[in-house]
Amino acid sequence: MPEGRRPADSVLLRGAAAVFGVLGLLGSALADGQLLATGGVSTIEGSAGGGVVPWAVLAGYGTSDEWGGSAFASTLNTGDYRLDVAGGALTFNNRLELSLARQSLRLSTLGPALGLGAIRLEQDVVGAKLRLYGDLIYGDWPQLALGVQHKRHRDFAIPSAVGARSSSDTELYLSATRLFLAGAGGYNLLVNGGIRYTRANQAGLLGFGGDQGGSRRAQAELSAAVLLNRHWAVGADYRQQPDLLGFAKAEDWRDLFVAWFPNRRVSGVLAYVDLGDVATLKNQRGWYFSVVANW
Amino acid sequence: MPKHSQWLRPLVLASSLLLLCGCVSTSPVSGDDELFVALGGEPDLRLLVDEFIAVSAPDPRVAPTFANTEMKRFREKFYEHLCELSGGPCVYSGDPMAEVHRGLKINEGQFNAVVENLQIAMSRRGYPQPVQNRLLARLAPFQRDIVVQPGNSD
Ligand code: HEM
């Protein structure tokens, strides 16, 4: 869809990005107190976690007396769809994470089929995550966090045409994450379990609610990862999806990933993602790449 | 049932079990000396302590805290502590962890720096990951005694 159709939105987003940048620099005695890899990577919605599942950890490597943050760019290509995401997050005292992401979904197959060319659908996600209790590694309790994501679709014509009820929504999630030292045959094991209260179709890229239901429901979000050493992790995500649009069944998402943490400044993710059937197109699978910078 | 239930069930089971057992802390010291042996016994463990000190000495995150420390004593007590913790034939004769570190105002970042330096030292000494992680798993419970807690709630 044409850029700049909603100039107010762009100004807002650019302003927010500028504020983020300035705050990030202010906090920029590098926040390095956490162990390598324990900040996770950036999810496609901007919050820290695995590839598609937010974890209870907060972005960056700051401890309770530091500010930190991250910026990322990710891309997923299934052939029929291509999702590009860019965004960032700021974390204050390992207590509160604020995040921003802009997602752009290219309909490589459906667009031309509808006579619209290779169109894109865009969505903005503004998130906040509060660490409630516990710790990823130390003490008796896993790290628990409560998150909220406000999503605003910028190109609602197509979601609306297939039955979505709303172009924006706010959803809550609760997640628990723990790193078990020597937990998997001597290797460190990270386990995350979460619940999201949502009515988003394909995470909101196809709008919110639909002809099959308008209310939010609890959906499971799980991840497990084994740290091969300080620098490499392999794991899997699973994310349940509500199925609210009658025109096509939505299936749960899952992925297998390899993440590389050469140092605290950058990390990279390579994943193989299976979104199931998406908007009538079968078996949407493909590679996902992501690069994250931390400070 | 949708086909992904074959993924979901083991994942749900695994995560709930693991999160559950995360709330039940296990005793740091097991009865046997398996880990002590895996660490190579006294000679290798002493070399690990030396390597750890060598890695930490130039590290600005931890070195200043040791400014007034008598290193000969630290080296001996730290060895004893690791030896006992790994099931070796030692009795730690130093002061209790909470008491030793209380006045030092050690923060979370410094504790993690020590963990990281130990990891680096263990890698340099050639220990496989599982041995490294087993030792760290026995050290992790001391974090709450050593670090000045940011709040009293967690
Ligand atoms: C798992 C982590 C740690 C273990 C197992 C440990 C163990 C010990 C042991 C056994 C001693 C000797 C006690 C004695 O002399 O009676 C000691 C002393 C000391 N530790 Fe730690 N320590 C840990 C973490 C730290 C950290 C993170 C710091 C700060 C960066 C630190 C700073 C010191 C200092 C400065 C002393 C000497 C105190 C003095 O001079 O009296 N330790 N530690």
Image: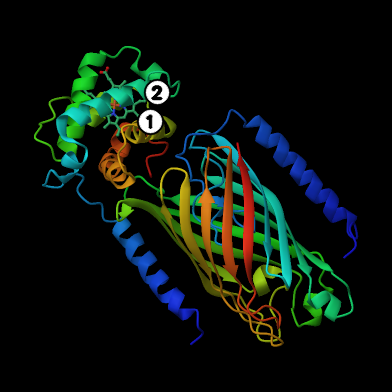
Give the quarter the ligand 1 occupies. top left
Q: Amino acid at mark 2?
A: Val
Q: Tell me what residue is drawn at x 29 percent, y 59 percent.
A: B21
* A142 up-or-down from B109: above or below: below
* A11 up-or-down from B37: above or below: below
How far across and down, in percent of the image, does residue A198 sit? 60, 71
Q: Tell me what residue is drawn at x 25 percent, y 13 percent.
A: B70
From the image, which quarter does the N terminus of chain A lie in? Answer: bottom right
> Foreground: B60 or B151?
B60
Q: Secondary structure at mark 2?
A: loop
* Dot 2 beta carbon under 8 Å from ligand 1: yes
Left/right of residue A245 with respect to residue B100 in the rendered view: right
Q: Tell me what residue is drawn at x 52 percent, y 59 percent.
A: A257
**Residue receiving disc 1:** B117
Label 2 packing within 10 angstroms: few (<14), some (14-19), many (20+): some
Query: Decide: marks 2, 1 in contact (CB < 8 A)?
Result: yes
Q: Residue furthest front?
A: B126
How far across and down, in percent of the image, does residue A75 sit? 68, 58
Q: Amino acid at mark 1?
A: Asn
Left/right of residue B1 with respect to residue B75 in the rendered view: right
Q: CA distance from mark 2 to mark 1?
A: 10 Å
**Residue receiving disc 2:** B62
Which chain does tag 2 point to? B
* B152 up-or-down from B45: above or below: below
